[in-house]
Image (cartoon, helix red, strand yellow):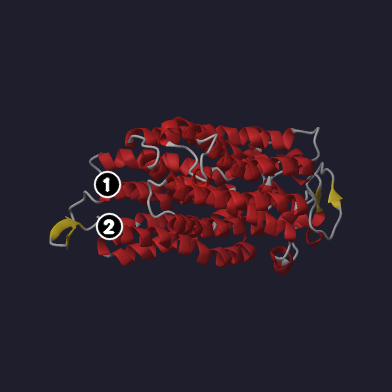
Amino acid sequence: MINRLWGNYFRVVIVLVSFMCLVSVCSNYIIINFTFICMKDDFSETKIWNGTIKSAYDYTPIEKKHILWAVAFGTIVGIFPMNMLYVRCGARLAFFSAGVLSAITTGLTPWAASQSIWALVAFRFLQGVAYSADFAAIGIVISKWAPLDETAVFISTLTSFTSISSIITNGVSGVICESHLGWKWSFYFHAAACLAVFIIWALVYKDDPTLHKSVSAKELGKIQRNKSESHIKDDMEIPYVKIFTSPVVLTVWLCAFTELSTLILIATYAPIYFRSVLGFDIKIIGFYLGLMLAIHLPFRFVCAFLSDKTKCISEISKIHIFNTLAVGCVGISFIVFRQVSQTQPSSKSEMFSSQIPAEHNISAVVCLAVLECFTSFNCGGFYKCGTLHARQFSSIVISAIQFTKCISLFSGPALVAFFVTDETNQIQWSYVFFVLAGFTFLANILSFIFFTDQPAKWTEDGGVVKYSKEKEIVKI
């Protein structure tokens, strides 16, 4: 009955449920970015600041920095303990525990905010610990449930949770904040939704597709095709030293770091740059940024399909092409900004002036949209390389990308703080862009030297399963 319901595509259900869980955990930690706007107008709790009565929830820039950075610290601290929990208990229990922690801390965030700023920071730290489980879950779901010829599609779907969570959370929070319910109910709603999707996760997910009643023999054969016996059984001790010293893996992490630094810089400072340098009206900034995101998301799935289904090019060639587009072309895009802004510079300072002058502000939107589209190729580039090389240990590799993302949260603002003292100065912004471009070029060059589509020696100790007509282990 169940097999007739899902056919030979139960892995699609696993991906969708996993995706909803990833979106929920991410939404829980970014929700406060929007509710800051509403919280400051809530005078149910007040404080006196410089002789003026203000809302207790009207935070200073320094307080907001602590609130926002607490998640990054929590994620950094939680990555390795969460990985150990995955290793000892499996993804079903580990990710469910993270989801429950995220739901509880989100539901109690309004209470923590009413107590003190440090209580709120503590709860935000715990949300970061829960968020640290996301990328390890992505790695395990891909390793266990993705056929090798669907790897890019799995990666593209599961790694798009950040963008989707932003769209959902901003929309839902805006409606709730403006209603009679108020900003607190936005947290309550997200907490309830999180608990619901993780209960579904616990009911649907199993770490081993061989043991799942809803997986047909035909689908199991597709999932296991061309995977080694050690990959399928996943009973080897994790070779941490070999993983963390692998030139391939280190290059994957460098590519991820450069690309994530770029995306975080755009997400954080594009509104400021559009307003202060290009002179956009505030109302139109959100529209253009949303438009870029709308173009970016469907393009990811097109890229994933091309990566998995193109057979006329070798796998390693596809990896190099896609990684060059995802990483190298991002750096080129920064250089193109200058070419668009000034084709014949009259001085050295103008040569390195910022990329798009105010009179060409529409060109800035086009350039950033193109840049966002280039990053969509990452599913067939460094992500795919790391997954195919690490195989059953890909969760370790991908979860470490979460660590690089946390570092990017600090390095991006630090780079801006070092070069930009005047937000209206195009030349100062140009130094930031050129430094990032340099790192993307370096990472892309190293990828041509070290990237491979072959599994590492430390992943193999058995033969290869070509096709399995019948399940070898009885489902329970």
Amino acid type assigned to the residue bearing label 2 in the image: Tyr
Q: Position of residue 198 (x, y in %)?
A: 50, 50
Q: Quadrant of residue 111?
A: bottom left
Q: Crowdedness of circle 2 by 10 Å Cα count: few (<14), some, many (20+)?
A: some
Label 1 sits on a secondary structure element that is helix
**Residue 139, disc:** none
Amino acid on which the number 1 mark rests in the picture: Cys
Q: Where is residue 206 in the image (x, y as percent from the top left)?
A: 63, 51
List the single residue furthest toward the front: 346
Q: Are marks 1 and 2 in contact (CB under 8 Å)?
A: no
Could you tell which of marks 1 and 2 lies nearer the N-terminus? Answer: 1
Residue at horizontal 66 percent and vertical 37 percent from the top? 304
The quadrant of the image that shows the N terminus is: top right
Q: Where is residue 265 in the image (x, y as percent from the top left)?
A: 48, 49
Q: How crowded is mark 1: few (under 14 residues within 10 Å), some or many (20 or more)?
A: some
| Residue corresponding to mark 1 | 38
Q: In this view, does 108 lie to the left or right of 365?
A: left
**Which quarter of the picture shows residue 361?**
top left
Residue ID at (79%, 57%): 456
Q: Depth check: 182 or 372 in front?
A: 372
Which x, y percent locates residue 189? 36, 46
Tell me which corner region of the image, top left, top right, bottom left or bottom right, holds residue 313. Answer: top right
The answer to which of 10 and 446 lies nearer the viewer is 446
Relative to 429, does residue 370 appear above or below in the rendering? above
Residue tagged 2: 59
**In this view, 76 is above or below 172:** below
Give the residue furthest to the bottom.
241
Is residue 264 at all visible to an observer of this figure?
Answer: no
Looking at the image, which residue is at 42% across and 60% down? Answer: 69
Q: Is mark 2 on a helix, strand or loop?
A: loop
Q: Distance of mark 1 from mark 2, alpha carbons?
A: 12 Å
